[in-house]
Image (spheres, rainbow, N blue to C red):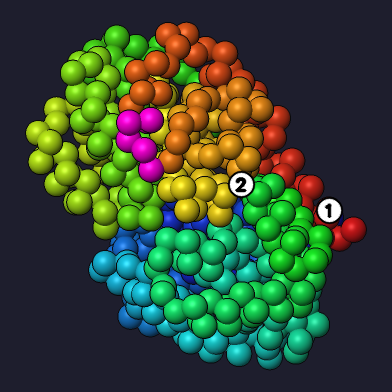
Protein backbone atom coordinates (compact mmCIF):
# COMPACT_ATOMS: atom_id res chain seq x y z
CA UNK A 1 0.00 0.00 0.00
CA UNK A 2 1.25 3.50 -0.85
CA UNK A 3 2.01 5.69 2.14
CA UNK A 4 -1.29 7.24 3.27
CA UNK A 5 -2.61 9.20 6.22
CA UNK A 6 -5.39 8.02 8.53
CA UNK A 7 -7.68 9.74 11.02
CA UNK A 8 -9.24 7.42 13.62
CA UNK A 9 -12.22 8.67 15.64
CA UNK A 10 -13.09 6.39 18.55
CA UNK A 11 -14.01 6.36 22.22
CA UNK A 12 -11.62 3.47 22.96
CA UNK A 13 -7.90 3.35 22.30
CA UNK A 14 -4.52 2.27 23.69
CA UNK A 15 -3.58 1.68 26.51
CA UNK A 16 -6.97 0.09 27.21
CA UNK A 17 -6.12 -3.62 27.57
CA UNK A 18 -9.24 -5.26 26.15
CA UNK A 19 -11.97 -5.11 23.51
CA UNK A 20 -12.16 -2.29 20.95
CA UNK A 21 -9.48 -0.16 22.59
CA UNK A 22 -6.95 -2.97 22.29
CA UNK A 23 -7.67 -3.60 18.61
CA UNK A 24 -7.71 0.11 17.73
CA UNK A 25 -4.32 0.59 19.37
CA UNK A 26 -2.77 -2.40 17.63
CA UNK A 27 -4.20 -1.37 14.25
CA UNK A 28 -2.82 2.17 14.47
CA UNK A 29 0.58 0.94 15.66
CA UNK A 30 0.71 -1.47 12.69
CA UNK A 31 -0.20 1.31 10.23
CA UNK A 32 2.40 3.71 11.66
CA UNK A 33 5.12 1.06 11.53
CA UNK A 34 4.22 0.50 7.87
CA UNK A 35 4.95 4.17 7.18
CA UNK A 36 1.47 5.72 7.34
CA UNK A 37 0.92 8.90 9.35
CA UNK A 38 -1.97 8.43 11.79
CA UNK A 39 -4.04 10.86 13.84
CA UNK A 40 -6.37 9.64 16.59
CA UNK A 41 -9.22 11.54 18.25
CA UNK A 42 -10.21 9.62 21.36
CA UNK A 43 -10.99 9.73 25.08
CA UNK A 44 -8.78 9.15 28.08
CA UNK A 45 -8.33 5.41 28.67
CA UNK A 46 -11.03 4.10 31.01
CA UNK A 47 -12.32 0.70 29.87
CA UNK A 48 -12.96 -1.86 31.35
CA UNK A 49 -12.49 -0.17 34.73
CA UNK A 50 -14.89 2.78 34.17
CA UNK A 51 -12.40 5.21 35.63
CA UNK A 52 -9.45 6.97 34.05
CA UNK A 53 -6.31 4.86 33.99
CA UNK A 54 -3.25 6.47 35.64
CA UNK A 55 -1.22 8.52 34.94
CA UNK A 56 -3.94 10.18 32.87
CA UNK A 57 -6.51 12.62 34.21
CA UNK A 58 -9.81 13.63 32.62
CA UNK A 59 -9.55 17.36 33.22
CA UNK A 60 -8.74 18.83 29.81
CA UNK A 61 -7.54 18.01 26.32
CA UNK A 62 -4.19 16.33 25.83
CA UNK A 63 -2.04 15.93 22.72
CA UNK A 64 0.49 13.11 22.36
CA UNK A 65 2.95 12.43 19.54
CA UNK A 66 4.97 9.30 18.98
CA UNK A 67 7.36 7.83 16.45
CA UNK A 68 8.30 4.19 16.76
CA UNK A 69 11.84 4.91 15.61
CA UNK A 70 11.81 2.36 12.82
CA UNK A 71 13.21 3.13 9.35
CA UNK A 72 10.36 4.34 7.16
CA UNK A 73 7.78 4.48 9.95
CA UNK A 74 5.16 7.21 10.12
CA UNK A 75 4.17 9.65 12.83
CA UNK A 76 1.38 9.12 15.36
CA UNK A 77 -0.57 12.02 16.86
CA UNK A 78 -3.21 11.35 19.53
CA UNK A 79 -5.74 13.91 20.76
CA UNK A 80 -7.49 12.91 23.99
CA UNK A 81 -10.76 14.64 24.81
CA UNK A 82 -12.37 15.04 28.25
CA UNK A 83 -15.66 13.20 28.61
CA UNK A 84 -18.16 11.96 31.17
CA UNK A 85 -17.38 8.52 32.65
CA UNK A 86 -20.31 6.94 34.53
CA UNK A 87 -19.62 5.11 37.76
CA UNK A 88 -22.42 2.67 36.90
CA UNK A 89 -22.43 2.28 33.09
CA UNK A 90 -26.09 1.54 32.42
CA UNK A 91 -27.36 1.83 28.86
CA UNK A 92 -28.57 5.40 29.37
CA UNK A 93 -25.40 6.46 31.18
CA UNK A 94 -23.27 5.08 28.37
CA UNK A 95 -25.28 7.07 25.83
CA UNK A 96 -24.61 10.22 27.83
CA UNK A 97 -20.92 9.32 27.95
CA UNK A 98 -20.78 8.78 24.20
CA UNK A 99 -22.52 12.05 23.40
CA UNK A 100 -20.18 14.03 25.64
CA UNK A 101 -17.32 12.67 23.52
CA UNK A 102 -19.21 13.68 20.38
CA UNK A 103 -19.34 17.23 21.76
CA UNK A 104 -15.77 17.56 23.05
CA UNK A 105 -14.21 15.83 20.04
CA UNK A 106 -15.81 18.35 17.66
CA UNK A 107 -13.35 21.05 18.70
CA UNK A 108 -10.37 18.81 17.87
CA UNK A 109 -11.92 17.93 14.53
CA UNK A 110 -12.50 21.63 13.85
CA UNK A 111 -8.79 22.29 14.31
CA UNK A 112 -7.86 19.47 11.93
CA UNK A 113 -10.01 21.02 9.20
CA UNK A 114 -7.43 23.81 8.93
CA UNK A 115 -4.50 21.42 8.56
CA UNK A 116 -3.23 19.26 5.72
CA UNK A 117 -5.84 16.85 4.37
CA UNK A 118 -5.90 13.25 5.59
CA UNK A 119 -6.59 10.44 3.10
CA UNK A 120 -8.88 8.20 5.19
CA UNK A 121 -11.21 9.07 8.06
CA UNK A 122 -11.91 5.89 10.03
CA UNK A 123 -14.79 5.69 12.51
CA UNK A 124 -15.15 2.62 14.72
CA UNK A 125 -18.54 1.68 16.18
CA UNK A 126 -19.67 1.48 18.87
CA UNK A 127 -20.48 4.20 19.42
CA UNK A 128 -22.30 4.54 16.13
CA UNK A 129 -22.21 8.34 16.00
CA UNK A 130 -18.41 8.74 15.63
CA UNK A 131 -19.05 8.34 11.92
CA UNK A 132 -20.77 11.77 11.83
CA UNK A 133 -17.44 13.52 12.33
CA UNK A 134 -15.76 11.25 9.78
CA UNK A 135 -18.43 12.21 7.23
CA UNK A 136 -18.09 15.90 8.08
CA UNK A 137 -14.35 15.63 7.50
CA UNK A 138 -15.02 13.89 4.18
CA UNK A 139 -17.38 16.58 2.92
CA UNK A 140 -14.98 19.40 3.76
CA UNK A 141 -11.57 17.81 3.11
CA UNK A 142 -12.54 15.14 0.52
CA UNK A 143 -11.20 12.21 2.53
CA UNK A 144 -12.57 8.71 2.12
CA UNK A 145 -14.62 7.40 5.05
CA UNK A 146 -14.17 3.91 6.48
CA UNK A 147 -16.94 2.89 8.87
CA UNK A 148 -15.88 -0.20 10.85
CA UNK A 149 -18.55 -1.89 12.96
CA UNK A 150 -17.42 -4.04 15.88
CA UNK A 151 -20.87 -4.37 17.44
CA UNK A 152 -24.40 -3.73 16.15
CA UNK A 153 -25.04 -1.24 18.94
CA UNK A 154 -28.55 -0.18 17.98
CA UNK A 155 -29.71 -3.79 17.55
CA UNK A 156 -28.15 -4.72 20.88
CA UNK A 157 -29.82 -1.83 22.70
CA UNK A 158 -33.19 -2.88 21.29
CA UNK A 159 -32.82 -6.63 21.86
CA UNK A 160 -31.60 -6.21 25.44
CA UNK A 161 -34.20 -3.58 26.32
CA UNK A 162 -31.65 -0.86 27.10
CA UNK A 163 -33.99 1.71 25.56
CA UNK A 164 -37.78 1.43 25.35
CA UNK A 165 -38.79 4.08 22.80
CA UNK A 166 -39.97 2.56 19.50
CA UNK A 167 -39.97 5.92 17.71
CA UNK A 168 -36.37 6.51 18.76
CA UNK A 169 -35.33 3.18 17.28
CA UNK A 170 -37.12 4.04 14.03
CA UNK A 171 -35.06 7.21 13.81
CA UNK A 172 -31.83 5.40 14.69
CA UNK A 173 -32.31 2.66 12.09
CA UNK A 174 -33.17 5.18 9.34
CA UNK A 175 -30.12 7.21 10.27
CA UNK A 176 -27.93 4.10 10.28
CA UNK A 177 -29.12 3.15 6.79
CA UNK A 178 -28.29 6.64 5.54
CA UNK A 179 -24.83 6.55 7.15
CA UNK A 180 -24.05 3.14 5.66
CA UNK A 181 -24.70 4.54 2.20
CA UNK A 182 -22.65 7.70 2.77
CA UNK A 183 -19.44 5.94 3.84
CA UNK A 184 -16.95 4.97 1.14
CA UNK A 185 -16.20 1.67 2.84
CA UNK A 186 -18.12 -0.26 5.50
CA UNK A 187 -16.58 -3.23 7.28
CA UNK A 188 -17.44 -5.64 10.08
CA UNK A 189 -16.00 -8.62 11.90
CA UNK A 190 -18.28 -11.62 11.31
CA UNK A 191 -20.40 -13.20 8.59
CA UNK A 192 -23.61 -12.74 10.56
CA UNK A 193 -23.04 -9.03 11.11
CA UNK A 194 -21.94 -8.54 7.51
CA UNK A 195 -25.14 -10.18 6.21
CA UNK A 196 -27.31 -7.97 8.43
CA UNK A 197 -25.52 -4.82 7.30
CA UNK A 198 -25.59 -5.81 3.63
CA UNK A 199 -29.33 -6.53 3.77
CA UNK A 200 -29.93 -3.25 5.57
CA UNK A 201 -27.85 -1.08 3.25
CA UNK A 202 -27.88 -2.89 -0.10
CA UNK A 203 -24.12 -2.46 -0.46
CA UNK A 204 -20.89 -4.44 -0.13
CA UNK A 205 -19.57 -4.87 3.41
CA UNK A 206 -15.87 -5.66 3.76
CA UNK A 207 -14.69 -8.45 6.03
CA UNK A 208 -12.33 -7.04 8.67
CA UNK A 209 -12.09 -9.55 11.54
CA UNK A 210 -10.35 -9.08 14.85
CA UNK A 211 -6.88 -10.55 15.09
CA UNK A 212 -4.42 -11.90 17.63
CA UNK A 213 -0.67 -11.87 18.18
CA UNK A 214 -0.03 -15.58 17.63
CA UNK A 215 3.60 -15.09 18.60
CA UNK A 216 2.73 -13.83 22.08
CA UNK A 217 -0.35 -15.95 22.76
CA UNK A 218 0.81 -19.54 22.34
CA UNK A 219 0.03 -22.98 23.78
CA UNK A 220 2.07 -24.05 26.82
CA UNK A 221 2.97 -27.66 27.42
CA UNK A 222 2.23 -28.49 31.06
CA UNK A 223 -1.35 -27.43 31.83
CA UNK A 224 -1.38 -29.57 34.99
CA UNK A 225 1.55 -27.63 36.45
CA UNK A 226 -0.08 -24.34 35.52
CA UNK A 227 -3.24 -25.32 37.38
CA UNK A 228 -1.22 -26.12 40.48
CA UNK A 229 0.49 -22.72 40.22
CA UNK A 230 -2.95 -21.08 40.23
CA UNK A 231 -4.13 -23.02 43.26
CA UNK A 232 -5.96 -25.96 41.65
CA UNK A 233 -5.36 -29.68 41.69
CA UNK A 234 -3.79 -31.19 38.59
CA UNK A 235 -6.92 -33.23 37.86
CA UNK A 236 -9.40 -30.36 38.36
CA UNK A 237 -11.38 -29.31 35.30
CA UNK A 238 -11.15 -25.52 35.17
CA UNK A 239 -13.91 -23.64 33.33
CA UNK A 240 -12.58 -20.15 32.66
CA UNK A 241 -14.33 -16.93 31.70
CA UNK A 242 -12.10 -13.91 31.13
CA UNK A 243 -13.47 -10.62 29.86
CA UNK A 244 -15.85 -7.78 30.56
CA UNK A 245 -18.42 -8.31 33.31
CA UNK A 246 -21.53 -6.37 32.40
CA UNK A 247 -25.19 -7.21 32.77
CA UNK A 248 -25.66 -7.58 29.02
CA UNK A 249 -23.28 -10.57 28.90
CA UNK A 250 -25.61 -12.71 31.01
CA UNK A 251 -22.78 -14.13 33.13
CA UNK A 252 -25.14 -15.12 35.94
CA UNK A 253 -25.63 -18.33 33.96
CA UNK A 254 -22.10 -19.36 35.03
CA UNK A 255 -22.87 -18.94 38.73
CA UNK A 256 -26.13 -20.89 38.41
CA UNK A 257 -24.34 -23.66 36.49
CA UNK A 258 -21.70 -23.76 39.24
CA UNK A 259 -24.48 -24.31 41.76
CA UNK A 260 -26.02 -27.11 39.69
CA UNK A 261 -22.65 -28.89 39.43
CA UNK A 262 -21.49 -28.18 43.00
CA UNK A 263 -21.39 -31.87 43.96
CA UNK A 264 -18.81 -32.59 41.25
CA UNK A 265 -15.82 -31.52 43.28
CA UNK A 266 -13.34 -31.60 40.38
CA UNK A 267 -15.31 -29.00 38.39
CA UNK A 268 -14.04 -25.47 39.09
CA UNK A 269 -15.23 -22.16 37.68
CA UNK A 270 -13.25 -18.94 37.30
CA UNK A 271 -14.68 -15.53 36.36
CA UNK A 272 -11.89 -13.08 35.63
CA UNK A 273 -12.30 -9.43 34.71
CA UNK A 274 -13.89 -6.19 35.81
CA UNK A 275 -17.26 -4.52 35.37
CA UNK A 276 -20.22 -3.18 37.28
CA UNK A 277 -22.01 -6.56 37.34
CA UNK A 278 -19.19 -8.39 39.13
CA UNK A 279 -20.50 -7.49 42.59
CA UNK A 280 -23.92 -8.92 41.68
CA UNK A 281 -22.35 -12.20 40.56
CA UNK A 282 -20.33 -12.41 43.78
CA UNK A 283 -23.52 -11.86 45.78
CA UNK A 284 -25.32 -14.68 43.92
CA UNK A 285 -22.37 -17.01 44.55
CA UNK A 286 -22.40 -16.05 48.24
CA UNK A 287 -26.13 -16.78 48.48
CA UNK A 288 -25.46 -20.25 47.13
CA UNK A 289 -22.43 -20.59 49.46
CA UNK A 290 -20.40 -21.83 46.50
CA UNK A 291 -16.84 -23.02 46.97
CA UNK A 292 -16.30 -24.11 43.36
CA UNK A 293 -16.09 -20.64 41.83
CA UNK A 294 -13.46 -17.88 42.04
CA UNK A 295 -13.62 -14.24 41.02
CA UNK A 296 -10.31 -12.75 39.90
CA UNK A 297 -9.27 -9.30 38.66
CA UNK A 298 -8.23 -8.68 35.07
CA UNK A 299 -4.81 -10.25 34.54
CA UNK A 300 -1.89 -8.20 33.23
CA UNK A 301 -0.49 -9.04 29.82
CA UNK A 302 2.75 -10.47 31.24
CA UNK A 303 0.81 -13.31 32.91
CA UNK A 304 -2.18 -13.52 30.60
CA UNK A 305 -0.83 -16.20 28.26
CA UNK A 306 -0.07 -18.49 31.20
CA UNK A 307 -3.46 -17.73 32.73
CA UNK A 308 -5.36 -18.63 29.57
CA UNK A 309 -3.37 -21.84 29.19
CA UNK A 310 -4.39 -22.84 32.71
CA UNK A 311 -8.04 -23.17 31.69
CA UNK A 312 -9.28 -26.53 30.43
CA UNK A 313 -12.33 -25.07 28.71
CA UNK A 314 -13.05 -21.40 28.02
CA UNK A 315 -16.57 -20.08 28.50
CA UNK A 316 -17.95 -17.64 25.94
CA UNK A 317 -21.31 -16.45 27.19
CA UNK A 318 -23.90 -14.57 25.16
CA UNK A 319 -27.57 -13.94 25.77
CA UNK A 320 -30.00 -15.33 23.22
CA UNK A 321 -31.17 -11.82 22.34
CA UNK A 322 -27.66 -10.82 21.28
CA UNK A 323 -26.48 -14.11 19.80
CA UNK A 324 -25.56 -12.76 16.35
CA UNK A 325 -25.07 -9.06 17.05
CA UNK A 326 -21.38 -9.27 17.95
CA UNK A 327 -18.51 -11.73 17.76
CA UNK A 328 -16.70 -11.79 21.13
CA UNK A 329 -13.22 -10.31 20.82
CA UNK A 330 -12.00 -12.60 23.61
CA UNK A 331 -12.29 -15.56 21.22
CA UNK A 332 -9.12 -14.62 19.35
CA UNK A 333 -6.79 -14.99 22.36
CA UNK A 334 -8.50 -18.23 23.38
CA UNK A 335 -7.91 -19.77 19.96
CA UNK A 336 -4.30 -18.58 19.85
CA UNK A 337 -3.40 -20.45 23.06
CA UNK A 338 -5.10 -23.57 21.72
CA UNK A 339 -8.04 -23.23 24.07
CA UNK A 340 -11.18 -25.29 23.58
CA UNK A 341 -14.27 -23.15 24.07
CA UNK A 342 -17.81 -23.73 25.29
CA UNK A 343 -20.18 -21.21 23.76
CA UNK A 344 -23.77 -20.35 24.59
CA UNK A 345 -25.27 -19.73 21.16
CA UNK A 346 -27.98 -20.89 18.79
CA UNK A 347 -27.45 -22.73 15.49
CA UNK A 348 -27.22 -20.58 12.36
CA UNK A 349 -25.25 -17.81 14.07
CA UNK A 350 -21.72 -16.78 13.12
CA UNK A 351 -20.33 -17.94 16.45
CA UNK A 352 -22.04 -21.34 16.22
CA UNK A 353 -20.73 -21.85 12.69
CA UNK A 354 -17.15 -20.92 13.61
CA UNK A 355 -17.13 -23.32 16.57
CA UNK A 356 -18.85 -26.31 14.96
CA UNK A 357 -17.50 -26.15 11.40
CA UNK A 358 -13.92 -25.87 12.63
CA UNK A 359 -14.36 -28.25 15.59
CA UNK A 360 -12.76 -25.84 18.03
CA UNK A 361 -15.13 -26.36 20.94
CA UNK A 362 -18.67 -27.04 22.10
CA UNK A 363 -22.02 -25.26 22.21
CA UNK A 364 -25.08 -25.17 24.43
CA UNK A 365 -28.31 -23.19 24.69
CA UNK A 366 -28.10 -19.53 25.76
CA UNK A 367 -29.84 -18.35 28.95
CA UNK A 368 -30.06 -21.93 30.22
CA UNK A 369 -27.90 -22.81 33.27
CA UNK A 370 -29.03 -26.44 33.16
CA UNK A 371 -27.92 -26.78 29.54
CA UNK A 372 -24.55 -25.23 30.41
CA UNK A 373 -24.07 -27.51 33.42
CA UNK A 374 -25.13 -30.62 31.48
CA UNK A 375 -22.72 -29.81 28.66
CA UNK A 376 -19.87 -29.29 31.11
CA UNK A 377 -20.57 -32.58 32.88
CA UNK A 378 -20.64 -34.49 29.59
CA UNK A 379 -17.52 -32.99 28.02
CA UNK A 380 -15.24 -35.65 26.53
CA UNK A 381 -12.16 -36.52 28.54
CA UNK A 382 -9.91 -35.91 25.54
CA UNK A 383 -10.30 -32.52 23.87
CA UNK A 384 -6.80 -32.31 22.39
CA UNK A 385 -8.21 -32.27 18.85
CA UNK A 386 -10.31 -29.20 19.60
CA UNK A 387 -7.27 -27.50 21.11
CA UNK A 388 -5.14 -28.30 18.08
CA UNK A 389 -7.85 -27.07 15.72
CA UNK A 390 -8.18 -23.85 17.72
CA UNK A 391 -4.49 -23.04 17.40
CA UNK A 392 -4.48 -23.87 13.67
CA UNK A 393 -7.49 -21.63 13.10
CA UNK A 394 -5.74 -18.74 14.85
CA UNK A 395 -2.50 -19.07 12.90
CA UNK A 396 -4.27 -19.44 9.55
CA UNK A 397 -7.05 -16.87 9.88
CA UNK A 398 -6.32 -14.43 12.73
CA UNK A 399 -2.76 -13.26 12.09
CA UNK A 400 -2.56 -9.46 12.32
CA UNK A 401 -0.29 -9.03 9.30
CA UNK A 402 -2.47 -11.01 6.92
CA UNK A 403 -5.69 -9.32 8.12
CA UNK A 404 -4.40 -5.74 7.95
CA UNK A 405 -2.55 -6.30 4.67
CA UNK A 406 -5.77 -7.58 3.12
CA UNK A 407 -7.82 -4.73 4.54
CA UNK A 408 -5.47 -1.98 3.35
CA UNK A 409 -5.49 -3.62 -0.09
CA UNK A 410 -9.31 -3.68 -0.11
CA UNK A 411 -9.65 0.05 0.58
CA UNK A 412 -7.33 0.85 -2.32
CA UNK A 413 -8.85 -1.58 -4.83
Residue bearing mark 1: 409
Q: Counting residues from the N terminus, which is met first, the one under dot 2 or under dot 1?
A: 2
Rendering coords of residue 285 (x, y %): 16, 39
Q: What element does badge 1 sit on?
A: helix
Q: Tell me the chief SS of the magenta region.
A: helix
The residue that appears at 23% across and 16% down in the rendered structure is 264
Density class for disc 2 (Cα within 10 Å; few <14, some 14-19, many ≥20) is many
Quadrant that contains the C terminus: bottom right
Q: Which residues are magenta?
A: 367-372
357 falls in the magenta region: no
The residue that appears at 57% across and 71% down in the rendered structure is 128
Q: Is residue 24 positioned above or below 313 on the image?
A: below
The residue that appears at 74% across and 41% down in the rendered structure is 402
Residue bearing mark 2: 210
User: Which of the 4 quarters of the picture holds residue 257?
Assistant: top left
Q: CA distance from mark 2 to mark 1?
A: 17 Å
Rendering coords of residue 378 (x, y %): 39, 16
Q: Is residue 193 left or right of residue 319?
A: right
The residue that appears at 42% across and 8% down in the rendered structure is 381
Rendering coords of residue 220 (x, y %): 46, 18
Residue 212: in sight, yes or no? no
User: Which of the 4 quarters of the picture holds residue 294?
Assistant: top left
Q: What element does badge 2 sit on?
A: loop
Q: Is residue 182 positioned above or below 407 on the image?
A: below
Q: Is residue 248 left or right of residue 71?
A: left
Task: Tell which tag, 2 or 1, sits nearer the viewer.
Answer: 2
Q: Is residue 392 positioned above or below 111 on the image?
A: above
Residue 381: in sight, yes or no? yes
Density class for disc 1 (Cα within 10 Å; few <14, some 14-19, many ≥20) is few
Rendering coords of residue 406 (x, y %): 79, 47
| Of residues 250 and 293, the one drawn nearer to the viewer in this rendering | 250
Q: Is residue 295 left or right of residue 190?
A: left
Amino acid sequence: MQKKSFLLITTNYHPEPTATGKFNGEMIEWLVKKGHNCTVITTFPHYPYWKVMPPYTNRWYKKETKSFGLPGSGLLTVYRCPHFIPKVPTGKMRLIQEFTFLFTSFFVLLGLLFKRSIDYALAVAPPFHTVYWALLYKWIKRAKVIYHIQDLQIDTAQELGMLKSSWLFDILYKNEKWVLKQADFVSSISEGMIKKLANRSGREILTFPNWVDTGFFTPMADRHKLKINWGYAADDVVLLYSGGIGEKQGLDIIVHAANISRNHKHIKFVICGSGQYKVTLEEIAAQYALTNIKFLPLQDKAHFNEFLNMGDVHLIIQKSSASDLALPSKLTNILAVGGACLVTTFPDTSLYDVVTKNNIGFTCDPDNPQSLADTILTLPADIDQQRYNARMFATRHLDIDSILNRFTHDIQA
